[in-house]
Image (cartoon, rainbow, N blue to C red):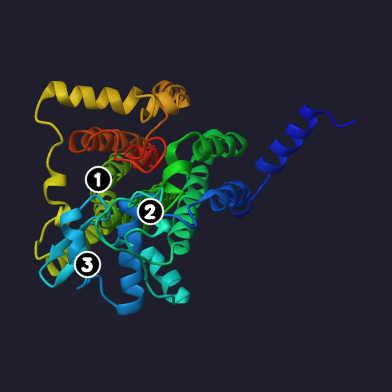
Amino acid sequence: MVTAMQRLERARTFIDDSSGGRFFLVVLAPVLAIYLATASWTSVASSDPYTNMMTAWQMANNGTVVFDDLGPYVPLRGQISWIVEGPDGQVSQYPPGAAMLAVPLYAIDGDDLEVIPQGDPRRDGTYYEDLPVDVVLPPLWPGAAVGAVTAAVAVALAALTARPFAGAFVAAVGAWVYAFGTGTWAVAADDLWQHGPAMLWIALGLLLVTRDHPWLGGLSLGLAILTRPPTAIIAAAIGLASGIAKRSVVEVAKVGAGAVAGLAALVAYNAVVLDTASITGGYGAAAEPYTSSVLGYVQNVLGGLFDPARGLLFLSPFLIVAVIGAIAARGSLRGPAFGGLVGGGAYLVVMWGLNRYSGGSGFVGYRYPLEAIAAG
């Protein structure tokens, strides 16, 4: 009779002996299957993914990110969507990165927008139940699909990055803990938030730079910036750490060139669509510090770490062990991997300064630390 220990040893041997491609698929398959099975296929989690899906639908069907009939949504910013008034009509306050990934699926779908009028029972129990306007819904499945796929691929890419440092079996198990023990499953994999796409580009960028492809790695990090602008902090840290490890200014320039390309694309997009050549674009007041006092910031950080509903270390306590392990291995942790850790930490420090740690409603767990986890 085969014992449990023998089965475990066989699984370990299979994973350890896997080629890079097979290892990637072994890690990806169970994560993707569960993410796809549990995503929000028939509902909208919150105003954030709703806004991204509306933008993707508009891009696929009309070739533009600008609406001319969503004026009633602007005063309800944050309640039904994050639609703002642009120079040519109503547009998302968000960069286009997340929406762009859903455009091919919306082009395939071909369905029109659906109007859900006030009083319609389909609004019961949704976040837009009590809003005083008709709600226009795009097909919802593309958003769920992109969220699930991008989050799952980000996890598998993280396993590939960790494999040379931790070994294949440990990297795979660690990736599965990451997939199901963090807010990745409950948030990024659930719907078309910005988090899944940003995590994908960060994970791919870190892997590529680690494998000596700084140009491509920088470009991937640039796409993360085009999706979620504060990730520029992570890109800078990875590029600098890689350059320092190799004692090469050229290495920094190569990673930086791709990242700056993404930053330039973001500024150009904001200039054309929102009439402001800036990084913040349509965020407006949301880009200002959440609190101006040191005490308020400390309280926000403590909430972000230990709040029972949103606390990073309360909900994912295994990260305490991971941080201790990283500190213990600091002598061998160099280059892009070290840059990802430092950049992720700096990103989180900034995000807790810009936003309330709770990150709003309509989801389970935390969401602001997700890009930091992807970088670390």
Residue 285 place in picture, x, y as percent: 11, 46
Q: CA distance from mark 2 to mark 1?
A: 14 Å
Residue at the spot x=10%, y=61% of the render? 277
According to the picture, the residue beneath numbered tag 3 turns out to be 70
Of 158 and 285, the residue lying toward us:
285
- Amino acid type at image mark 3: Leu
Question: Is disc 1 surrounded by few (<14), some (14 to 19) or many (20+) residues within 10 Å?
Answer: many
Q: CA distance from mark 2 to mark 3?
A: 31 Å
Question: Is disc 2 surrounded by few (<14), some (14 to 19) or many (20+) residues within 10 Å?
Answer: many
Q: CA distance from mark 3 to mark 1?
A: 37 Å
Q: Are marks 2 and 1 in contact (CB under 8 Å)?
A: no
Q: Quadrant of residue 61?
A: bottom left
The quadrant in which the N terminus is found is top right
According to the picture, the residue beneath numbered tag 2 turns out to be 201
Residue 195 place in picture, x, y as percent: 36, 48
Residue 236 disc label: 1
